[in-house]
Amino acid sequence: MNQKIQIRKSLYKKEAIIVALQMYLKKYWVAILEDESDYFIQFEPKNGNNIKISENEFINQLIEAEFIYMKSLESLPLRKTIMKKALEPYYDKND
């Protein structure tokens, strides 16, 4: 049996939803559906059992994923600078 969890688009980014879903991918077929204002996360157990996803547990995973996503955006300029410095010896100086 399929289960859907509704998430307001104004609260979470799709990228965070994708990160939060990673822990469910071994046991569930997952689909992200959407309309203008909401995402609908659909879970279908791979083994056919009627296992219910805890909506509160998923929201906690989503909050953690949103935090990770925000931190990755904050650290992006620093990571780019580090990679540029690390790869600088390999760049052709004539380019």
Image (cartoon, rainbow, N blue to C red):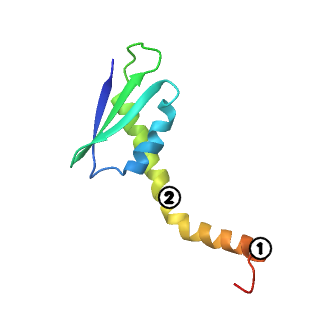
Which residue has dot 1 on it? 90
The location of residue 46, given as percent across then percent down, is: 46, 20
> Which picture quadrant has residue 31?
top left
Q: Residue at 37% of width from left, 38% of height from top?
A: 59
Count of labels in the image: 2
* Front tag of 2 and 1: 1
Amino acid at circle 2: Lys
Could you give the CA–CA distance between mark 2 and mark 1, rounded to whole angstroms? 29 Å
Amino acid at circle 1: Tyr
13 vs 84, left or right, is: left
The residue most toward the left is 36
Which residue has dot 2 on it? 71
Residue in the foreground of this view, choosing between 23 and 40: 40
Residue in the foreground of this view, choosing between 88 and 72: 88
The location of residue 52, given as percent across then percent down, is: 37, 20
Tag 2's secondary structure? helix
- Mark 2 or 1, nearer chain start: 2
